[in-house]
């Protein structure tokens, strides 16, 4: 029964997606939504039923022997272990709530069959990444989430900007996929297997330089999917898709895939201090970069998009510091409150008839108090207010980084502290601009229960997620760390005084961030404030830099190749040969006059030429 249950977890959403693709147009709208939600909910139930099998080495199931010949054995396997089990439960549970929300959110949308088919396919692809022990299956899921993100971000493709955003996400993430593909093939060449567990077991036999190179390739692959430096420019534009898509990408699927990949390969990556430092550096720099961008955004969903980028940077910072447990803890808590924030933002935009400019919103606490409460709960978790889930998970990361003996990690810890302060500022800024003050946009209707109901479980999970890994100082037993066991990586050895000091510093950062936001944005804000911070609002002009350094030179090279090499060079040579042939044929044609005298003369000349050639041949002998 257990192997069947394990196979059903990813296959149920796939089965639903296929049914919707084949027969969805013949089904009533209610049946389409019910099938899509039911498939993901059933995967959640299957994960819970299978939970006892996650202990120890877990459950390993061979689905199919893709290749089994002499010297080559490539089975397609799924692995349900202490690392994949909590990730699977998070993905299925959060995805179920997002699907429920999507039923109400897309109630007036005509093309719901395509939407829910892609949404189910998205969950299937992510579950392949989470559960697959075969790198071949991981890569299929990896490309699957890339395709689904492209199709869903550009779901409203009739508008050019939406189609452009989908293409941008697809192309930028493909860059990272190339590096991941190189790492996959290299590992197969070195180990003769595509099994992640087998590769990790053989990692100690690999040369140190090779481990470092593979670790950097995996980091680049993860950076593409998780929108980290330098492949992060696609994520903010991905807000062009429907809000359920944004919630799914940022909370439960694509953006966390890169972090999870590094966690799975941690036994290999941990053998290279250089690779770990590179991972931590990318994470720390991205956390700071994205926090500065979030502070300058005017659109509510773009604030949350840059926030996701920043929080994923914290997760990479934890992996680089050696604490997979802290990374997974923040990944899970972040999924709860970020899904809550995106879905609440979607309700706000819905109530404001499509308006998403922070400076044109406001007064939500008066017009829709229930939605305002939910939004504030998500904001408290994101800002890391003490005793919320975000407080414990973020501080676990900062503790791990601060406890690292190398000096470089002390600098990264300081960068993390600054990023945490910026996080508190932009989070409370968003809360004040949306909820406080007088309404600046009319709210003409009330949010439907279908939009609000799925948010309450996420609010509770976000507030109480700290109980998953409550530290011993507060009477907890760090349950998640113990559950992960050997998969948790290195655990920082810090004194109780250092732990209390970190908590106090975190609380101080939240307080300072709240005071700054309250003094600046609690009253009627100046809508023109952004004129001075266009640099940060544009993402540090990264798109302009990419266009200048890469796109324009590439376009110039393409134009040169087309106009000079192709048209002048290749086409010119071909045209010249054709002209020579035409000249030769016209010369022969002029001799073919039909006159007897011309024919006799031509024959005489030909005979003389043959005689000369024959005489020359005899002389050469």
Image (cartoon, helix red, strand yellow):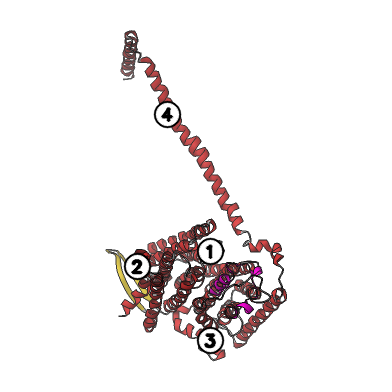
Which contiguous range is marked in magenta? 341-369
Q: Earlier in the sequence, mark 4 or mark 1?
A: 1
Secondary structure type for disc 1: helix
Secondary structure type for disc 2: helix
Secondary structure type for disc 3: loop
- In the rendered image, which residue does mark 3 sit on? 470
Q: Could you say which is closer to the camera, residue 469 or residue 356?
A: 356
User: Which disc, if any, is residue 578?
Assistant: 4
Q: Residue at x 68, y 76 (%)?
A: 437
Of tags 2 and 4, which is closer to the observer?
A: 2
- In the rendered image, which residue does mark 1 sit on? 238
- In the rendered image, which residue does mark 2 sit on? 19
In the rendered structure, are the residues bearing label 3 and label 4 in contact, judged by CB atoms less than 8 Å apart? no
Q: Earlier in the sequence, mark 3 or mark 4?
A: 3
Pinpoint residue 115: horizontal percent, then vertical percent. Answer: 44, 66
Q: Residue at x 55, y 75 (%)?
A: 344
Q: Earlier in the sequence, mark 1 or mark 2?
A: 2
Pinpoint residue 527: horizontal percent, then vertical percent. Answer: 70, 66
Decide if residue 619 is in sight here.
yes
Of tags 4 and 1, which is closer to the observer?
A: 1
- Marks 3/4: CA–CA distance: 81 Å
Of tags 2 and 3, which is closer to the observer?
A: 2
Q: Is residue 356 above or below residue 610?
A: below
Q: Could you say which is closer to the camera, residue 56 or residue 336?
A: 336
Dominant secondary structure of the residues highlighted in magenta in the image: helix
């Amino acid at each position: 029964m257990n192997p069947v249950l394990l196979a059903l977890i990813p296959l149920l959403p796939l089965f639903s997606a296929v049914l919707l693709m084949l027969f969805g147009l013949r089904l009533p709208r209610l049946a389409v939504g019910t099938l899509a939600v039911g498939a993901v909910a059933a995967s959640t139930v299957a994960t819970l039923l299978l939970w006892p099998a996650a202990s120890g080495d877990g459950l390993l199931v061979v689905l199919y022997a893709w290749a089994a010949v002499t010297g080559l054995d490539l089975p397609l396997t799924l692995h349900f272990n202490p690392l994949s089990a909590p990730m699977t439960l998070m993905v299925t549970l959060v995805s179920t709530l997002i699907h429920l929300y999507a039923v109400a959110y897309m109630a007036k949308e005509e093309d719901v069959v395509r939407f829910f088919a892609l949404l189910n396919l998205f969950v299937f692809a992510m579950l392949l990444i989470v559960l697959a022990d075969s790198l071949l299956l991981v890569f299929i899921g990896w490309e699957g989430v890339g395709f689904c993100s492209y199709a869903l971000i550009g779901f409203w493709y009739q508008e050019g900007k939406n189609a452009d955003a989908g293409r941008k996400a697809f192309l930028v993430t493909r860059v990272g996929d190339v590096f991941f593909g190189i790492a996959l093939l290299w590992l197969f060449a070195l180990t003769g297997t595509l099994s992640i567990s087998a590769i990790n077991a053989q990692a100690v036999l690999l040369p140190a330089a090779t481990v470092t190179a593979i670790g950097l390739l995996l980091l680049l692959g993860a950076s593409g999917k998780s929108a980290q430096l330098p492949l992060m420019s696609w994520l903010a534009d991905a807000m062009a898709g429907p809000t359920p898509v944004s919630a799914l990408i940022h909370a439960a699927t694509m953006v966390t895939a890169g972090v999870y990949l590094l966690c799975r390969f941690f036994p290999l990556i941990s053998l290279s201090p250089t690779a770990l430092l590179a991972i931590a550096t990318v994470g720390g720099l991205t956390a700071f970069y994205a926090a500065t961008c979030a502070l300058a955004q005017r659109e509510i969903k773009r604030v949350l998009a840059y926030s996701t980028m920043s929080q994923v940077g914290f997760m990479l910072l934890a992996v680089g510091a050696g604490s997979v447990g802290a990374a997974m803890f923040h990944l899970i808590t972040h999924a709860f409150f970020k899904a809550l924030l995106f879905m609440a933002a979607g309700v706000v935009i819905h109530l404001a008839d499509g308006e998403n400019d922070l400076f044109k919103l406001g007064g939500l606490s008066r017009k829709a108090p229930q939605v305002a409460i939910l939004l504030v709960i998500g904001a408290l978790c994101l800002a890391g207010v003490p005793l919320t889930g975000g407080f414990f998970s973020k501080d676990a990361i900062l503790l791990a980084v601060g406890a690292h003996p190398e000096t470089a990690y002390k600098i990264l810890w300081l960068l993390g502290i600054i990023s945490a302060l910026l996080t508190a500022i932009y989070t409370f800024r968003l809360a004040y601009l949306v909820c406080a003050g007088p309404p600046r946009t009319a709210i003409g209707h009330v949010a439907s229960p279908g939009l609000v109901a799925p948010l309450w479980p996420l609010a509770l999970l976000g507030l109480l997620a700290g109980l998953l890994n409550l530290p011993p100082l507060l009477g907890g037993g760090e349950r998640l760390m113990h559950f992960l066991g050997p998969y948790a990586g290195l655990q920082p050895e810090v004194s109780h005084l250092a732990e209390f000091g970190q908590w106090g510093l975190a609380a101080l950062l939240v307080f300072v961030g709240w005071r700054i936001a309250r003094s600046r944005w609690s009253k009627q804000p100046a809508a023109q404030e952004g004129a001075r911070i266009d640099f940060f609002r544009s993402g540090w002009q990264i798109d302009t830099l990419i266009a200048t350094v890469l796109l324009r030179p590439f376009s110039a090279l393409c134009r040169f190749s087309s106009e000079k090499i192709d048209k002048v060079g290749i086409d010119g040579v071909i045209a010249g040969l054709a002209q020579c042939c035409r000249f030769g044929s016209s010369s022969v044609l002029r001799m073919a006059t039909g006159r007897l005298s011309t024919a006799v003369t031509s024959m005489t000349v030909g005979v003389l030429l043959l005689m000369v050639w024959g005489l020359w041949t005899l002389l050469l002998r």
